Image (cartoon, rainbow, N blue to C red):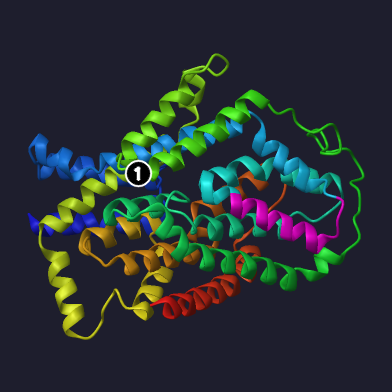
Amino acid sequence: MDLFILAVFIATYLGMALGRVPGLGVDRTGIALLAAIVLQTVAPRDGAALVAAIDFETLAILFGLMVVSIQFAACGFHDRCAHWLANAACGPFVLLALVVGVAGGLAALLTNDVVALAMTPMLTRGLMARGLDPKPYLIALAGAANAGSAATLIGNPQNILIAQTGDLDLLPFLGACLPPALIGMACCWACVAVIWRAALRRPAVPPAAPPAAPPATMAPPAVDRSGLIKGLVATALLLVLFLTPLDRATAALIVAGLILTSRRLRSRDTLGLVDWQLLILFVGLFVVVDSFTATGLPSLLLDAATTRGLDPLATGPMVALTLAGSNTIGNVPLITLWLSILPAAPTEALYRLAVFSTLAGNFLLIGSIANLIVADQAARQGVSLGFLDHARCGVPMTLLSLGFAWGWFALIA
């Protein structure tokens, strides 16, 4: 049976690397769910063991953060930010810096995927209406959202998982991870500014025909002030609760409940915007990885690697493994597996793991869900952001940011 579980595990992570099942309409979420179903059918476990395999606290935190992010999107805050950026009266390099700063800052609090999804359409339309090439700004948006999300334990799904496993505190995490996140944002700006300098310096050429969507030069999108205040209060309350002894899952659910208690937003609409795909992906991976861990094979592989002098917690191997893993199977599946093998890693190692796995997602277009979201949303606006377009900046910005992060953690060790 162990061989069967190993085969399912390998097939699952091969599917994570490919992103789909060839010939079928099954994506990463479907692969993880189907793998969990196959394991429970062929190698069934009792209900208690199956439930124990699923980290419901992490799922609750993710759900709560999604609801908070939806509150900001629903009140028009993200659209207003994108409109302001697209119409900022400044030069292209300053505008690029504004995109990096806003995207990175918002991602640290509202998660990188949500920021990428919410800001890309309006920003793309606004830049096109001004006659600017949106590609460098969109690459900067994705890169900064990833880099900025590394700063906090709620910035992205893998950080949430790492923080839960290691029981990490909010402020120490921020102190250790904020500097490399800021450096990563700076690397993002520098690489895009240098590599796309010709496009950035090119004079704006207004479109010959009006864009299909309303141009950004029209009146800015309305913002529901009461909704925005509610979102800000909810975010502040969440951060305060995270500093108390109350467990984070309960804190996140309390805040989500307060947001769902609304006179203007129907709970059906709010819940319909929750990324259930990501939550199901987590559930499937929890079951698959737990089954694989129960075989004892991960411990044997770890012992063999350690015997040969390969310590995955050392900085060099960790950088290499996160860079390779994030750009093949994805950073969320990578971290799920990693933490199942090394659940008792030192706090400092968990800080490095969070930063390295997040920054590594900028390397290739497929390295981060946020990258793919930006490319998909841009395509819906008629802008093709291809693999090579991203790699031109993604490869150098990732290598630079990882190098600086390596130096930072060596400095504070």
Where does the C terminus fall, quadrant-wise?
Answer: bottom left
Identify the residue at horizontal 10%, vertical 45% (top origin): 43
Magenta-drawn segment: 89-105
Residue 104 drawn in magenta: yes
Residue 356 drawn in magenta: no
Magenta residues: mostly which secondary structure?
helix
Q: Amino acid at mark 1?
A: Leu
Residue 191 is situated, as x and y percent measured from the top left of the image, at 67, 71
Identify the residue at horizontal 14%, vertical 67% (top origin): 299
Instruction: Confirm whether residue 195 shows in the render.
Output: yes
Residue 232 is situated, as x and y percent measured from the top left of the image, at 57, 35
Identify the residue at horizontal 66%, vertical 31% (top origin): 76
Write down the residue under mark 1: 281
In front: 7, or 342? 342
Instruction: Confirm whether residue 22 shows in the render.
Output: no
Quadrant of the rendered structure where residue 120 is?
A: top right
Direction from residue 41 to residue 330 in the image, left or right = right
In front: 186, or 341? 186
411 versus 61 height, above or below? below
